[in-house]
Image: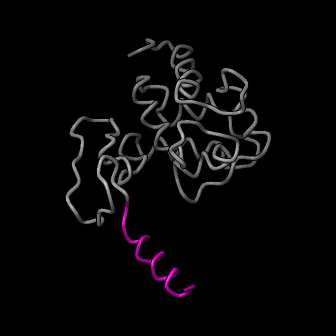
Amino acid sequence: MKTTLIKFLKIINKYTVSAGQRGWTPPDAHVPTCHLPNVICPANRWRMSITDVLSADDIAAALQECQDPDTFEPQKFFQTSGLSKMSASQVKDVFRFIDNDQSGYLDEEELKFFLQKFESGARELTESETKSLMAAADNDGDGKIGADGMSAPVRSTKDELGGHPGV
C-alpha cells in the first residue's frame, strides 16, 4: 500500500493542475494562455512564473535589498520589485500567485514564505518581518490578508511615489 501511494504521488508530481479545466494536464499539453501583457490569466496561472509579470532584474534588486534577516521593508520591496507600478487588478493577480492554498487569503504561515514566491532560493521572512507585513495589509485585524488588503500597501507606495491610483 505504501509503495503504491509513493508511486501515485510521483506520477502526480509530474503533472500540474490547470485552472479552468477538470483533471490533470501534462506539462507539455496545450493549455489556453492569455495574450495580454502583465496579466496572470486564470487559465495558465499554474504554469506561470512571477517573472512573467515582473522584471527578473527588478525582483533580483528587491531581493538583494532585503537579503539579510530583518531588512525587509514592504514599501521598499513593492517599489523596487515593480509591484507599485502595477494596477490594482494586476496586484490581485500577483496575490493569487502568492496565495499557496488558493484560499483567497494569506495568513502568517504563507507570508513567512513571501520572498520565496519571487525566487525559490530566497530566505524566509523573520517573525517580526512577517508581523510587520501582516500589520501593513490586514485591514480588519483578523490575521489574514485578502487581495484587497495586499493591494492597499502596494497602491499606497504608488501614491507616495506620485503615481496615479487605479492606473
Judged by its main secondary structure, the magenta piece is helix
Q: Which residues are magenta?
A: 1-16
Q: Position of residue 39 (x, y in %)?
A: 33, 35
Residue 15 inside the magenta-drawn segment: yes
Q: Position of residue 154 (x, y in %)?
A: 54, 25
Q: Nearer the viewer, residue 91 or 29?
A: 29
Q: Nearer the viewer, residue 65 or 88?
A: 88
Q: Nearer the viewer, residue 112 or 4?
A: 4
Q: Is residue 140 above or below residue 130?
A: above
Q: Is residue 140 above or below residue 78?
A: above
Q: Position of residue 108 (x, y in %)?
A: 70, 42
Q: Nearer the viewer, residue 18 or 138?
A: 18
Residue appearing at x 43%, y 46% in the figure: 50
| 89 with respect to 70 (left or right) | left
Residue appearing at x 44%, y 25% in the figure: 85
Name the residue at the right extreme: 128
Residue 77 inside the magenta-drawn segment: no
Name the residue at the front extreme: 1
Q: How many marks?
A: 0
User: Which quarter of the image is occupied by the N terminus?
Assistant: bottom right
Residue appearing at x 40%, y 30% in the figure: 90
